[in-house]
Amino acid sequence: MLGITWLSFNVILAIAGIFYVLDYFGFLRTIPLVNTLSGKMPRNPVFLMGAIVLVAVGMGWVSVGSVSDTVDNESPGPEVTTDIKDQQTVNLEEKSGGGGWSEKTLIFTNAHEIHSYNNDTKSMKVADMNNDGHLDVIAGNNGQIDCWYENNSDGTFTAHEININSEWANSIAIYDLNNDGYLDIICGTGGVNSWYENNGDGTFTPHDIHSHEKDTQAIKVADMNKDGHPDIIVGNAFEYKNYWYENNSDGTFTAHEIHNNAKNTYAIELADLNNDGYLDYIAGNGNENYWYENSGDNTKFTAHEIHTNPDWTKSVDVADMNGDNRIDILIGNSGYKNCWYENSGDDTFHEHEIHSKSEYTRSLKVNDINNDGHLDVITGVNNDSNYFYENNGNNTFTAHKMHSNKKRTYSIEVIDFNNDGIKDIIVGNWDTNNWYEADFVH
């Protein structure tokens, strides 16, 4: 309007307020040029308070709505849920460059359906499978055809079947195992685990990782022995032990036990927890959770209990939550509260609740989704709405419902799916899979 920017408007407010304050206390009477004007201005304490407010707003010390928002954010309080039909809005404050605070709203728009297939998806990943510059979706399903969904770059996807050797694809990982420039699919199943070589034409060739038949619930790819070759690491349920499979660089793998105890593992993560240069193994179990220290000699892992609580852990993630340069552990539990465990630097961990809400978490991810410099927690929930927990920067979190529909989510990914600079949420469900577009609005 009239070419006046918000910055110009704020400057005008500040100058007007400062002028009245100076005049109120008589500082302008000694200046001949403005003495005539100042002498005509009323000196009213109410006007003085208004002038002070003008200065505060103009200088950016206070913004409209900031007082009520500050009160609301001083304690965790109840969860914040705002439903506007299919659109979910969450009020967030994002620090502005001028030293003040500007209120923005994070919006998750209507769920975009990836495909009409009823997938029973247990694991979902996002990657560019055909090197066309667009992010595709890969789904590992239970009792259904496994697919990768080619992103047509127009909001639609084309389904391509993958001939997984088992009906139960519990976990998948994406990695270029043979270094041919195409991403391959590594699959943990209820039978023999396999990796699927990407032929570059939309088809995949299966290769067995090992003859083991385990009930693999989690699978990862990383270089465990620092020989430059990507290895495969699995977490197995029930009475089966956990293994890592050393890549012999000739298409074969050698099995190594992580530890001789079987802990009914449902989730794993890899991170150098003790800063010795080797990736350690973190196991989320059906009872106590452990981390296993990698000694670097291919065979020896030392078990450390993370905590004594008998959780039913379905998801694990890692991040430095408090900025102390140590990797912390985040646990997503089914029927118990979710927690993050602060790395004390002496092989022990201190428990912090993410929120008092107990939920049937199947997938948990850490990401700064609102770009405020603090790592937030996003959860995929079975038979409930999915949540993200906003990190308040003081070891507390505020719960925000992402959507109102109950999707039985088993897998969740956080990535800028549409390349607009804002991170979106992609979910793998026990029915149709969706992605939720995120946006900030003033």
Image: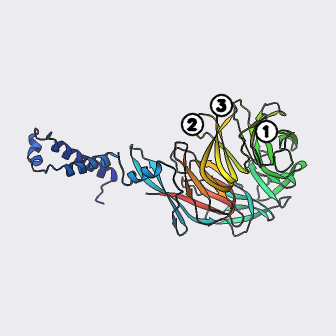
Q: Which residue is mark 1?
A: 229
Coloring scheme used: rainbow
Q: CA distance from mark 3 to mark 1?
A: 29 Å
In the rendering, which numbered label is found on residue 345? Answer: 3
Does residue 132 appear in the picture of this structure? no
State the separation of the CA atoms marked 1 and 2. 31 Å
Residue at coordinates 56% horizontally, 47% vertically from top-left? 368
Q: Amino acid at mark 3?
A: Gly
Cβ atoms at labels 3 and 2 below 8 Å apart = no
User: Which residue is painted at 65% across and 54% down in the image?
Assistant: 413
Mark 1 burial class by Cα count in 10 Å: few <14, some 14-19, many 20+: some
Q: Measured from the top left, where is residue 74 in percent x and y?
A: 46, 47
Is 226 situated above or below 76?
above
Determine which of the numbered discs, if any, sits on residue 182 in the image.
Answer: none
Q: Position of residue 356 (x, y in %)?
A: 60, 51
Which residue extends farthest right? 211
**Badge 1 or badge 2: first in the primary sequence:** 1
Image vertical order of residue 160 relative to residue 259, above or below: below
Q: Is residue 438 above or below residue 328?
A: below
Mark whose residue sits in front, 3 or 2: 3
Q: Amino acid at mark 1?
A: His
Q: Nearer the viewer, residue 144 or 348?
A: 348
What residue type is disc 2 on?
Answer: Gly
> Residue 223 is drawn in which quadrant?
top right
* Residue 114 in the figure: left or right of residue 394: right
Q: Quadrant of residue 104?
A: bottom left
Q: Are marks 1 and 2 in contact (CB under 8 Å)?
A: no
Is residue 3 visible to us here?
yes
| Structural crowding at the residue carrying mark 2, measured as other residues with C-alpha within 10 Å and reported as few (<14), some (14–19) or many (≥20) | few
Using residue 50 as the reference point, say whether residue 163 is left or right of it.
right
Q: Which quarter shows the C terminus?
A: bottom left
The residue where tag 2 is placed is 323
